[in-house]
């Protein structure tokens, strides 16, 4: 999952706490857990502030509190073991944010799969249930990275175990129902959490979550690109992509000047030529991941007669020429490492390019420093897929009709219970419940409310009456499908 990923046996885990070590200077840390009480700011009848209760969790420390009307918003660190199988091997500080509404409300556990934003925001399920939200930064995304970094401890089970410990710690305060959610790699993360710790959550809402079961079999993506959108739009995109490779020499000269002006280097990919082609190869995928069919009129209609600058501008706007520089790749090293060791990565043929491509779709290994060893584990995604087909209960998957990632998706099987897969007509990688057709929207919203334990009686009698319990907030609920840039993630 690149600039187009840039949006991928249950074992015992340490459930107890690990002593806080290496907390940032000036962070406030408390030592003992508090009793369960209720209240938004101060607990009724006790005067105990919610911040004090949170900081009473061993290993929890405060980075900052930011005000937001109707909520308390905390940016926190939590001490986690580097290796949940062997806690004595050291700890690291994992960043968490907490949007506190009230302990009497349900809680949504959001995972983006990458860095966590430290500005207040609300996922769609949080708005639907009018609840609290805990958001977790994925391990090894800085600053939530052990030092020194043992990359072998970056896998989906270790990450699920991070989430399990956070849930176990906060459940003593937030005692009502919990839902897990996330989009793209975050939707994958929510799924893996449910696979390894199926008793923690009361429901899962996973958006646009890829499911690359067999890494070497990607024909579903080829079929997708043969039919997505309209022929006119596909021809426009294919034409611009082809011209970018036909004009490799003059455009690479422009790329060299661009990189020099920005201070960009290409040590990880190995050359400017490889980085240039990687950007171009992402172009069609990136367009459908983040754009709509209605935007195709912005693509040059006759690429062969377009100027070099027009070709450059279109590729840069959709794929981004900074993506495969060392500086563009550095933040996403944990993602590419996971794509090349467990998650898998797609490959598509793109026959309209003929023999113009020198490298094809380059593997994740090309985007991770060679000092970090990698070996792919083909059984990991097969295990998750089998589990979802046979054991997925109270899980909702939402996909976009025109999002390439939906070509390989999760599909709960006949043995699953109260689980759904729904598709937003014409939707892209920003597909959500609000974009579903009316019947699916109501059905999905009713399920989320039911799982959270807050479905009004009218909704229990008639799911068609389901709607979010909280009003839309233009700042808190703003959706940015490019939040993680445009990685094919």
Image: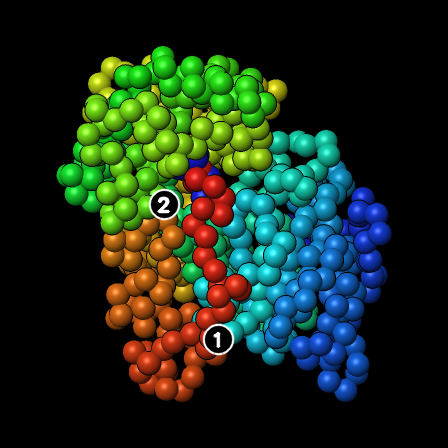
- SS of the residue at dot 1? loop
Identify the residue position indicated by label 2 in the image: 290
From the viewer's perspective, is residue 73 above or below residue 207?
Answer: below
Residue 7 x, y percent position in the rendering: 45, 44
Residue 473 x, y percent position in the rendering: 49, 69
Within-10-Å neighbours for mark 2: few <14, some 14–19, many 20+:
many
Q: Quadrant of residue 436?
A: bottom left
Residue 139 x, y percent position in the rendering: 62, 43
Query: Which of marks 1 and 2 precedes in the sequence?
Result: 2
Q: Residue at x 56, y 49 (%)?
A: 160
Q: Quadrant of residue 164?
A: bottom right
Identify the residue position indicated by label 1 in the image: 470
- SS of the residue at dot 2? helix
From the viewer's perspective, is residue 447 above or below residue 319?
Answer: below
Q: Does the CB distance between marks 2 and 1 fall below 8 Å?
A: no
Q: Residue at x 43, y 19 (%)?
A: 254
Task: Answer left or right for 487 relative to 268.
Answer: left
From the viewer's perspective, is residue 35 above or below residue 334?
Answer: below
Residue 358 x, y percent position in the rendering: 34, 14
**Colouring used for the render:** rainbow
């Amino acid at each position: 999952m690149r600039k187009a990923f840039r949006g991928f046996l249950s074992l015992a885990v340490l459930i107890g706490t690990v002593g806080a070590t290496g907390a940032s200077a000036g962070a406030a840390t408390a030592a003992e857990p508090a009793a369960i009480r209720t209240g938004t700011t101060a607990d009724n009848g006790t005067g105990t502030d919610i911040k004090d209760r949170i900081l009473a969790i061993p290993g929890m420390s405060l980075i900052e509190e930011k005000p937001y009307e109707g909520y308390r918003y905390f940016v926190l660190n939590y001490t986690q073991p580097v290796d949940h199988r062997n806690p004595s091997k050291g700890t690291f500080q994992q960043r968490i944010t907490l949007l506190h509404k009230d302990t009497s409300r349900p809680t949504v556990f959001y995972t983006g799969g990458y860095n966590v934003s430290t500005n207040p925001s609300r996922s769609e399920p949080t708005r639907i249930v009018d609840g609290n939200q805990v958001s977790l930064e994925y391990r090894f995304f800085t600053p939530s990275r052990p030092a020194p970094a043992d990359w072998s401890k970056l896998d989906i089970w270790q990450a699920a175990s991070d989430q399990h410990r956070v849930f176990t710690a906060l459940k003593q305060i937030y005692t009502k129902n919990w839902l897990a959610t996330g989009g793209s790699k975050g939707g994958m993360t929510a799924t893996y959490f449910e696979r390894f710790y199926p008793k923690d959550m009361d429901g899962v809402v996973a958006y646009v979550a890829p499911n690359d079961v067999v890494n070497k079999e990607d024909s579903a993506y080829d079929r997708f690109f043969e039919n997505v959108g309209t022929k006119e739009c596909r021809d426009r995109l294919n034409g611009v992509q082809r011209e970018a490779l036909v004009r490799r020499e003059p455009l690479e000269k422009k790329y060299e000047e661009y990189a020099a002006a920005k201070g960009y280097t290409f040590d990880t990919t190995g050359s400017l030529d490889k980085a240039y082609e990687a950007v171009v190869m992402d172009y069609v995928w990136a367009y459908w991941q983040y754009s709509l069919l209605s935007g195709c009129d912005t693509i040059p209609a006759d690429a062969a007669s377009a100027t070099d600058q027009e070709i450059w501008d279109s590729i840069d706007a959709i794929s981004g020429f900074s993506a495969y520089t060392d500086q563009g790749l550095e933040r996403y090293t944990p993602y590419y490492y996971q794509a090349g060791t467990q998650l898998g990565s797609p490959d598509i043929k793109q026959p309209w390019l003929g023999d113009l491509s020198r490298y094809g779709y380059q593997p994740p290994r090309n985007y991770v420093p060679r000092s970090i060893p990698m070996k792919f584990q083909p059984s990991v995604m097969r295990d998750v897929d089998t589990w979802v087909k046979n054991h997925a209960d109270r899980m909702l998957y939402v996909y976009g009709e025109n999002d390439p990632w939906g070509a390989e998706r999760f599909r709960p099987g006949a043995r699953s219970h109260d689980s759904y897969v729904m598709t937003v007509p014409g939707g892209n990688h920003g597909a959500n419940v609000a974009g579903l057709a009316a019947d699916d929207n109501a059905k999905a919203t009713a399920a989320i409310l039911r799982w959270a334990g807050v479905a009004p009686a009218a909704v229990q009698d008639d799911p068609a009456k389901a709607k979010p319990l909280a009003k839309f907030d233009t700042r808190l609920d703003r959706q940015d499908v490019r939040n993680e840039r445009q990685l094919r993630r």
